[in-house]
Image: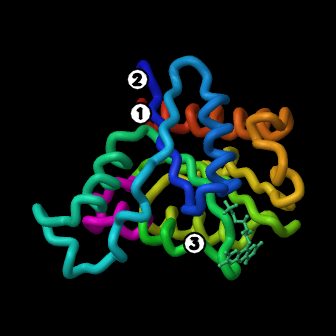
């Protein structure tokens, strides 16, 4: 595998999302040989419905997600916490990418989970639920690549994470660990 293609999914849709900014900062940490793309279009995907999940007739936005996940070597997840768990947009993406059962795009795909919220708990409930859901869906969650950011309103309210040296170092370590897992999975 010459170039590792990592796909970032951001669980917050708002324009000023700090999770999105963390994803943007992660893109800047990509070493040579690693390409990180932020997935656009999660908000276009209908809620998962088995009646819509028909072979050859899957909604275009859902099929596009499946194709993008399937073409990636690993996923970089950025999730806030909504009412103690994952935002629905991210859970919806997991559900679509988990199917067809046993052969979904998530199967054996390395995944790093980064969580970030305004509270000191750093979205750890959301992080834990993301790890659980990706694991149940058959993905390979890379524990060493996990990251949690708390107090993001204060920390990144005025400062983009790409201008925060410590955040960049942490994100670079996450990208490194995910890249290692992706290379190992490709050689398995
Ligand atoms: C519907 C909703 C529910 C939230 N629930 C929680 C929560 O359970 N725990 C928490 O730490 N923050 C919670 N927050 C605050 C988020 O941490 C905060 O809005 C954060 O900045 C969202 O990430 P973003 O900047 O990427 O959009 C909630 C925000 C919203 C909009």
Q: Is residue 99 magenta?
A: yes
- Asked if 97 appears above or below 40 in the picture, the reply is below
Q: CA distance from mark 1 to mark 2?
A: 7 Å
Helix, strand or loop under label 3: loop
- Asked if 65 appears above or below 35 in the picture, the reply is below
Helix, strand or loop under label 2: loop
Label 2 sits on residue: 1
Disc 3 within 8 angstroms of ligand 1 (CB): yes
Q: Earlier in the sequence, mark 1 or mark 2?
A: 2
Label 1 sits on residue: 186
Residue 129: horizontal and vertical position, in percent?
61, 71
In the image, which is nearer the foreground, mark 2 or mark 3? 3
- In terms of depth relative to the viewer, which is nearer, 145 or 187? 145
Residue 152: horizontal and vertical position, in percent?
81, 57
Specify the segment rendered in magenta: 94-107
Q: Earlier in the sequence, mark 1 or mark 3?
A: 3
Helix, strand or loop under label 1: helix
Whether residues under marks 1 and 2 lie with C-beta atoms below 8 angstroms apart, the answer is yes
Q: Earlier in the sequence, mark 2 or mark 3?
A: 2
Instruction: Let me know if residue 28 appears in the view.
Output: yes
Residue 35: horizontal and vertical position, in percent?
50, 29
Q: Residue 162 got which mark?
A: none
Label 3 sits on residue: 87
């Amino acid at each position: 595998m010459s170039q590792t293609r990592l796909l970032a999914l951001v669980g917050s849709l708002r324009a000023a999302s700090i999770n999105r900014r963390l994803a943007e900062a992660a893109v800047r940490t990509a070493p040579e040989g690693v390409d990180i793309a932020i997935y656009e279009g999660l908000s276009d995907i209908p809620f998962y419905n088995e009646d819509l999940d028909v072979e050859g007739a899957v909604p275009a936005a859902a099929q596009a997600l499946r194709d993008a996940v399937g073409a990636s070597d690993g996923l970089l997840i950025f999730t806030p916490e909504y009412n103690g768990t994952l935002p629905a947009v991210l859970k919806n993406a997991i559900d679509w990418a988990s199917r067809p059962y046993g052969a979904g795009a998530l199967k054996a795909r390395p995944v790093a989970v980064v969580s970030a919220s305004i509270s000191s708990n750093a979205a750890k409930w959301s992080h834990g639920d993301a790890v659980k859901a990706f694991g149940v869906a058959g993905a390979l969650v890379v524990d060493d690549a996990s990251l949690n950011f708390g107090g993001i309103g204060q920390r990144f309210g005025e400062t983009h994470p790409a201008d925060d040296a410590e955040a960049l170092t942490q994100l670079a370590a996450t990208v490194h660990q995910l890249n290692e897992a992706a290379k190992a999975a490709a050689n398995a």
